[in-house]
Image (spheres, rainbow, N blue to C red):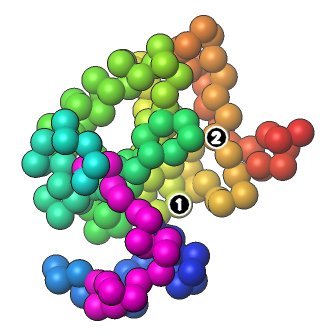
Amino acid sequence: MAIEQLAKPASKWCPHCRPGRGCRTYANRPAECRSFSCVWLVNPQLQEHWKPSRSKLVLTTSDDGLEVRCDPGFPDAWRKEPFRSELQQWTVSGEPLDMTIVVVTGQRMTLLTPEREFDLGLVGPDERIVRELEGTKVVNATVAKAIDVEQ
C-alpha cells in the first residue's frame, strides 16, 4: 500500500522492508504505519488461511466496506479457493447492508457483487467508484473524478 509519509507508492516495496523478515525501522516507523492494522489481525473470525503471508492478500476496511489488496506478485490470489468462495459469500451478506467489496491490485480495481465482477480498470487517487443501484443490487459501476462525484 502507499505510505504518504515515506512517499512510497502502492505496489512498491517499502525501502525499510526486508521481505520475509519485516520492517527494519519498526521502532521508529511513521504514524501511518503504527496506526495500520489489517483486518486479519483485528477480526478473530478470520481463519488462519487469510493471514497475509499465506493468502498474499491484505484485507482493509474503507468507508464503504472491504478492500482486498493483492500482493502484486500474486494478482490472482483472490480468485483461488477458499478466498473466492468466501468473498462471494461476503458479497451476498453485505449487499443488503450496502457494503462493497473491492479487489485492489496495484491501481487496478474490481468491484465484486453477488451477480458479477465489475472490472473498473486503473483507478487513481483522485477518482471514485460510482455504483448504480436498483434497491440494494448493484447493476452498474463506473469510475468518475472525485470532484465530479462531490458536486
Image position of 49 with respect to 126: above or below: above
**Furthest-right residue in this view:** 151
Q: Which residue: 61% across, 25% down?
A: 140
Is any atom of residue 131 visible in this view?
Answer: yes
Q: What mark, if any, has residue 107 been given in the picture?
A: 1
Looking at the picture, how far across and down is residue 90, in whole percent?
33, 27
Secondary element at tag 2: strand
Three-letter residue code for mark 1: Gln
Q: Is residue 104 left or right of residue 90?
A: right
How far is mark 1 from mark 2, CA to CA? Answer: 13 Å
Q: Residue 26's spot in the image, x, y percent? A: 32, 84
Toward the viewer: 76 or 92?
92
Q: Quick check: 43 above or below 135?
A: below
| For the residues bearing labels 1 and 2, Cβ distance under 8 angstroms | no
Tell me the residue that label 2 is attached to. Answer: 129
Give yes or no for residue 59 being in the magenta stretch.
Answer: no
Label 1: which secondary element: loop
Which image quadrant for residue 12? bottom left
Query: How far from the left and from the top, in percent, is residue 59?
Result: 34, 50
Q: Quadrant of the N terminus?
A: bottom left
Residue 20 appears in which quarter of the rendering? bottom left
> Which amino acid does the dot numbered 2 rest on?
Ile
Q: What span is in magenta?
A: 23-40
Please give the name of the residue rendered at 13% of the width and 42% of the height, measured from the top-left corner.
47
